Image (cartoon, rainbow, N blue to C red):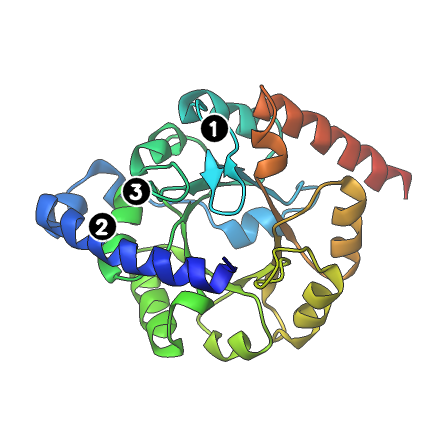
Amino acid sequence: MNLETILEKIVAEKKQVVAQAKAAVHTKALTQSQQFAMAKPSLKQALLQPGASGIIAEFKRKSPSKGWINQGASAASVVPAYVAGGASALSILTDETFFGGSLTDMVPAQHLAIPVLRKDFMVDEYQLIEAKAHGAAVVLLIAACLTPAQVKSFSQTAHDLGMESLLEIHTEKELDHWHPGIELVGINNRNLKNFEVDLVHAFRLRESLPQGVVAIAESGIQSPETIAQFRSQDFSGFLMGEKFMREAHPGEALSQFVQTLQAQSHAH
């Protein structure tokens, strides 16, 4: 099953999940939550900070392509360890069916000083309000799941709620989904047909992005050397999850990775 088929399946299921959530929790209850009124740090600023690792450390238990990665992982222990380990930001998967996550996984990140991305498949503005109510600073908008008009509307709503939007693209064609209100673009380095990592493709897409857009490399980053390659191509953020989540102590694995990364950048 290729990723396009998986995405269709996820989106169809997501619409049902959102309908159930709307019936269970009224928008008004979300807007009255304590987190809803709180200002959150900017992901763009965090990534452009001099000396930042640029790593967006991801908390995920499983994925459609890999199955279970870390079934028993607890966000309450991993999330603070990621921050202590030198992550510039956090990405928390809140999809239950395909990624084994939930909105509850965002709770341990709510009082930490770094930006949190709600990583999910946004198909409805209700999910943006949900994200804000659970402490998100940023929401993910996946071009492959949305029309350019939806991206524009969702990013405007996110902005009105005090959040940034990260537009994820895989192909040249998906650049059509970008508009000037979006300052963060994630380039997924995996080929949608066969899941293979293709860095050259990512570099090419980076060159096509408008001036001033902060680029984030997503997927398949295994080594500090790869990050150095991405930095040389003007990427500022690096989304990494599976590499750390496969370890018994993801936060320690991240900490060691960041130390190697910093040692290398000082050596150059």
Q: Which residue matches tag 1?
A: 79
Residue 267 versus residue 77 in the image, above or below? below
Tell me what residue is drawn at x 45 percent, y 24 percent: 73
Under mark 2, the amino acid is Val
Measure how far apart labels 1 and 2 are at the Cα level: 25 Å
On the image, the x and y values in percent for residue 63 come to 48, 43
Under mark 3, the amino acid is Met
On the image, the x and y values in percent for residue 79 come to 47, 28
- Describe residue 263's horizontal placement relative to residue 155 as left or right: right
Secondary element at image label 2: helix
Disc 1 vs disc 2: Cβ atoms closer than 8 Å? no
Q: Which residue matches tag 2?
A: 17
Q: Which residue matches tag 3?
A: 38
Tell me what residue is drawn at x 24 percent, y 52 percent: 129
Query: Does residue 70 appear in the picture of this structure?
Result: yes
On the image, the x and y values in percent for residue 146 come to 38, 70
Secondary element at image label 3: loop
- Describe residue 93's horizontal placement relative to residue 104 as left or right: right
Measure how far apart labels 3 and 1 are at the Cα level: 20 Å
Using the image, tell me which numbered label, if any, was put on residue 156: none
Label 1: how many Cα within 10 Å (few below 14, some 14–19, many 20+): many
- Describe residue 17's horizontal placement relative to residue 171 as left or right: left
In front: 195, or 120? 195
Under mark 1, the amino acid is Val
Measure how far apart labels 2 and 3 are at the Cα level: 26 Å
Tell me what residue is drawn at x 84 percent, y 38 percent: 264
In front: 37, or 58? 58
Depth check, mark 1 against mark 2: the one in front is: 2
